[in-house]
Amino acid sequence: MACGTRPLAVVACLFTAVQFALVVPGSGIGWDEAVYVSQVSPYVPAAFFSAPRARGITFLAAPAAALSQDPTALRIWFALLSGAALFGSFRLWLAILRPAVVVSAAGLFASLWITLLYGSQAMPNLWVAYGALAAVACLLLPASRGTHAGLAAAMALVALMRPSDALWLALPLAAAALASRAPGRLVALTGGVALGALPWVVEAHLRYGGLTARLHRAGEIQGGFGGQFAFGAQLRALSGRTLCRPCSDVPLNHPELALWWLGLPVAVAAGIAVARGRRRPLVLATAAAASVSVPYLFLIGYAAPRFLLPAYALLALPAAQALVHAARTWRRPALAALAFALAGHLAVQYAVLDRAADRYRLTRTAYARTAQELHGHGVRPPCTVSGHEAVRVAYALGCSSRQVGGHDGSIGAGTLQAMACLRPVVLLTSDGAPPPAYARTWRPHGLSPLPGLRSLHAYLPPGCADRAATPRAASTG
């Protein structure tokens, strides 16, 4: 057993245990998760799958989705899976860096509220992070069939989760492979990216009119690419926001929550400076982190903390190097100050995690209540939900979700009206917004508002409730 394996296993177990204690209980499902999980769930019709998305995370979610529609089953599955992946991806680094550095890096990354929150979620970014850690490690390890296969598999995982992230990650790794004159590594790298991106490319031709059309549509949905600095948006999102879009009007009420983010570059630079004989691995990890962060810091105008999880995983290595060096060389007063700073950092991470997890629990209760109220109005499967928060409401009901317009536009108004003659259809509007023209004659029903809304209304076509009560009519179409 490699030195450091047992302490690393302890970190992975603690990471999983904290998820079970603070995140998993009572947690609801997110909007993106509902889209991903519905693709493989036998209990919910598949939601519209927009151009930027990739199906890698749906494959990981499939075993839990097959067992239950309850988000708890999904949370348990991913908490266990993410703990195992944390151990496996950092274990590769035990042959490259000192065990104390690797274990500390795993602890730093695992203690972030972002890592803990998304560890049990069906979202791709954390798995990009694990793939990036494994890919960089395999590139640094002595060349062999095993490391070449590991590099290809790691890059395929990243590309399967997010093809664009794989391309950005591949840039510094390809440069390193060329510099070391290692054609086998370069072949493994490019082959892994191509293999992982293949489903996305094939789907582009089958469903989106070709690769160019899909890329263009993905850019439209993301708000365009280029010259949109998101540093401020990421800074504001660190207070616990899972998505900050738009972010310009969000006040920075708690700057202390972002101190660790501002101090991270300093710790990374210090770690590289004191590494001496192990500087190259840390430089490559930092270069890979910088590259994979480019689209999320410079090319889009909004932020989500999860976007930078791959960078945080890689930067944890030089940051841990700085901490381990300080622990070995500083005197007691300085060490006491460092310990105090780390304790404060952990307290901040816990506070933000607790608040974010509470929002997920509140969300689950609210959407379950909305589903129950709609069920009382005759909306039950097979059924279709459109309008505000249609994806999550539909998931809670077991209905399909369809939008007439916007980024997820997948049905025409006439088709939706015609569908209402065959099955229950409901249109949701929020905060007093009027229904669109095609639904002006539909009956309004007030619902309990969802979190963040002042009001929520359901519009049902005339006779919808009567038809829903008739099994024969409800099952038609």
Image: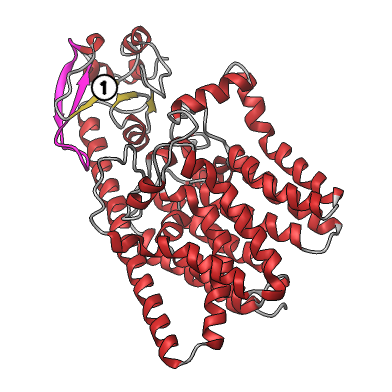
Which quadrant is the N terminus positioned in? bottom right
Residue 223 placement (x, y as % from top left): 43, 29
Residue 198 placement (x, y as % from top left): 69, 32
Residue 19 in sight in this render: no
Q: Tag 1, which secondary structure?
A: strand
Image-quadrant location for residue 240: bottom left
Please report the bounds of the magenta region as a residue range.
440-460
| Disc 1: which residue | 427
Q: What residue is at 61 percent from the left and 75 percent from the top?
A: 274
Left or right position of 145 against 272: right
Q: Dot 1 surroundings within 10 Å: few (below 14), some, or many (20 or more)?
A: many
Q: What residue is at 50 percent from the left and 88 percent from the top?
A: 330
**From the viewer's perspective, is residue 460 above or below residue 56?**
above
Residue 56 in sight in this render: yes
Q: Nearer the viewer, residue 143 or 53?
A: 143
| 459 in the magenta segment | yes
Which quadrant is the C terminus positioned in? top left
The three-letter amino acid code for the residue at tag 1 is Leu
| 170 in the magenta segment | no
Residue 160 placement (x, y as % from top left): 63, 40
Q: Nearer the viewer, residue 157 or 415?
A: 157
**From the viewer's perspective, is residue 446 above or below residue 138?**
above
